[in-house]
Structure formats: C-alpha cells, structure tokens
Amino acid sequence: MPVNQVASIATEGPRNLRIVPWDNTLNKVIEKAINDSDLGLSVSVDEKGVRVLFPELTSERRAGLIKLSKQKLEDARISVRMERDKVWDDIQEKEKDGILTEDEKFRLKDEMQKIVDEAGKRLQILTDKKELEMNS
C-alpha cells in the first residue's frame, strides 16, 4: 500500500521528510520499506513518526540516481511490452474464435502499437526530464 494512503507526509527542510502514520504500529514497517528500497536514504523513527534524510547530491550520487532511473525506464518498457504481448495473444485468440475478422485484428494491432509507442515516448520524456533535473 502506498505510504500516502496510510500516513501524512510533510517536509521538514530541503533534505528531510517527516512521515506520520495514522497508526503508530506502521512506523517500523515504513522504516523497513524505505531501507529495503536501496535508495541510500537515512531513516530514523521517533515518537512523532519516521524521519527520512536525503544525502547530499554529490556527482557520484547523481550518477547512481541516473543509472537507477535508466534501469527503472527499462523495467517499465519491459512491462509495457509484456502487456502488449498479452493483448496481442487475446486479439489472436478472438480472431481464431471468430469474434474478430482478420481486418479487425490488424486494425487493433496497429492501434495497440500506437499506444505502446506513445507510452514508450512518454516514459523516455519523463526519464530525460528527471535526468536533466538531477544534473542541474
């Protein structure tokens, strides 16, 4: 479950976040999830909630974050391709069952590919934008 659905999140400074769960028993769970994310963040738990400290953005850290963003981009592209393959299999199955004609099958394939291409472009734009932000 996303953190913003079980807690309030506020900034305490340019490099600090305060996460205050609505149920204090979630403090340790949130701390573990952040530590397991492998983002290099420091986490401390106190009576008010969870404090997340972001490290200084050194050139080495920036390079690591850019590398991570590219890996996330590739993971997203793989997910999109897997969904495309599932939809294509479904379209072919419907054509075999006589629900779709061959013309409809290829029309749907073209539409699907346009959607996949657009998703790929949007993912690339978002990654490029984030890389630009990290480099400035």
Image (cartoon, helix red, strand yellow):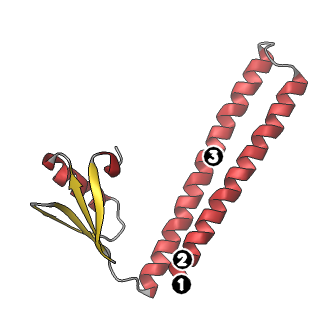
Q: Residue at x 79, y 14 (%)?
A: 99
The quarter of the displayed image where residue 16 is located? bottom left
Q: CA distance from mark 2 to mark 3?
A: 25 Å
Question: Residue 117, position in %: x, y?
Answer: 74, 51
Residue 133 badge: 2
Secondary element under disc 2, as helix, strand or loop, is: helix
Q: Where does label 3 land, which residue?
A: 80
Answer left or right for 100 relative to 135: right
Location of the N terminus (image quadrant)? top left
> Would you say the residues marked 1 and 2 are in contact, meaning their CB atoms lie under 8 Å apart?
yes
Dot 1 surroundings within 10 Å: few (below 14), some, or many (20 or more)? few
Which mark is in front, 2 or 3?
2
Could you tell which of marks 2 and 3 lies nearer the N-terminus?
A: 3
Nearer to me, 6 or 71: 6
Compared to residue 114, the image places residue 123 above or below, namely below
Q: Where does label 1 land, which residue?
A: 136
Answer left or right for 131 relative to 15: right
Q: Residue at x 52, y 73 (%)?
A: 66
Question: Residue 87, position in %: x, y?
Answer: 68, 32
Could you tell which of marks 1 and 3 lies nearer the N-terminus?
A: 3
